[in-house]
Image (spheres, rainbow, N blue to C red):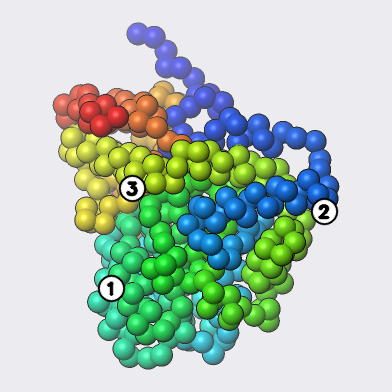
Amino acid sequence: VGRPMPFDAQDNVFLLAGPVKIHPRALQAMAQPAINHRGGEFKEINRELHGLLQHLFQWDGDVALLSGAGTAGLESVVSSLLRPADRVLSLVNGKFSERTHELSALHSKEAKALTFPWGRAVDPQAVAAELETAKYAAVTVCHNETSTGVTNPLKEIAAVCRKHDALVLVDGITSVGGIEVRMDWGLDAVVTGSQKCIAAPAGLAAVAVSKRAYERLHSERAFYLDLKKHIDALRDKQDTPFTPAIPLFLALREALRMLKAEGLEARLRRTARLGEACRAAARAIDLDLFADERFASNTVSAIRYPANVPDDKFRAVLREEHRTVVSGGQDAIKGKVFRIGHMGICSFQDLAAGWTGIEATLAGFGHAFARGAAVAEIAKRA
Ligand SMILES: Cc1ncc(COP(=O)(O)O)c(C=O)c1O
């Protein structure tokens, strides 16, 4: 019996729920000598990025690019739109939507959470009923709950919010570029992060903003994250208000060029096929999804462990012996699920390789199933 190939940081099967695998072209784009971020060359880069971001969001209105994690984008939206007296409703059905509620509570004295069980989707009718009870200035919603692998029915939720004239503030961090999101559904602010569906390095947040939201932006509660400042600088001067993360801008440009070359529609369709393949693989070897199947995400699958499979050991064996990296569960479902990211430039080959390792590891822990059945489902759909 041969030894397993040792884990190789340069070459492994990287299936985290984000950050995700980065294409060498995007990585190489960062290996450049320093450039003047106030010179003409960088203006050109920003001009191109402005267009690429509008393409990503399918939006000819305002966009911003902030140097910071996805949360910086969320914080810029919330702090630049809400005022303490504004009533805000946060739709909470997982860890990330819970976080946005905490963030909203920092900026609004009237922040309320409308909660749904983890693994279930937000129910637009329940949102409508809550919006009948009080005048809300804004609603926050996480389009794709990465913690549970649930995609919320954003279009329906937005329609309900619009009827009640509440701003719709969207965490699209694991949906934009992987699952359809349209500003013309009535969305007011949509945030994404560079390290998810775009497949660029972590460290940048992109935001799209509606006209009516733009008109309500204020500068009373944010400085670095003052969203209007970022939007205006990019739109009017191809500039950034503060020193940008220059190498990350270069990597993002390359990753967005690749996305555009593939075609946004094609990327969404491919991601949907990968999601379906991953779910079929799980089913084929008697693993249950954590999410309500009707709302299962095409970018992230949360899969329940069979009895007696220990999370830490499972992921350690998967990594050390099958050089495959997946995410664990978070908070209440830590130890109960593992999560696979299948967004960005993830391929069927990546998924098949990952599931080869997952099958072997589960068999090693005594889970009984037809060996090869999961991988066959991936191959069938490739
Ligand atoms: C849906 C969602 N929202 C927010 C975040 C936080 O993003 P960041 O860590 O880039 O701030 C994540 C990260 O996994 C996410 O998946």
Quadrant of the rendered image containing residue 263: top left
Q: Amino acid at mark 2?
A: Arg
Where does residue 136 sit, x and y in percent of width and height?
A: 43, 86
Give the Cα distance between marks 3 and 1. Answer: 20 Å
Mark 1 Cβ inside 8 Å of ligand 1: no
Q: Is residue 189 above or below residue 109?
A: above
**In the rendered structure, are the residues bearing label 2 and label 1 in contact, judged by CB atoms less than 8 Å apart?**
no
Q: Amino acid at mark 1?
A: Pro
Q: Is residue 180 above or below residue 270?
A: below
- Is 123 placed left or right of 256 in the picture? left
Question: What residue is rendered at 64% in x and 80% in y?
Answer: 218
Q: Which residue is mark 1?
A: 124
Q: Is residue 173 above or below residue 156?
A: above
Q: Is residue 256 visible?
A: yes
Q: Is residue 338 visible?
A: no
Question: What residue is rendered at 41% in x and 84% in y?
Answer: 165
Q: Nearer the viewer, mark 2 or mark 3?
A: 2
Q: Which labelled disc corresponds to residue 38?
A: 2
Where does residue 38 sit, x and y in percent of width and height?
A: 82, 53
Q: Amino acid at mark 3?
A: Asn
Question: What residue is rendered at 38% in x and 68% in y?
Answer: 185
Quadrant that contains the N terminus: top left
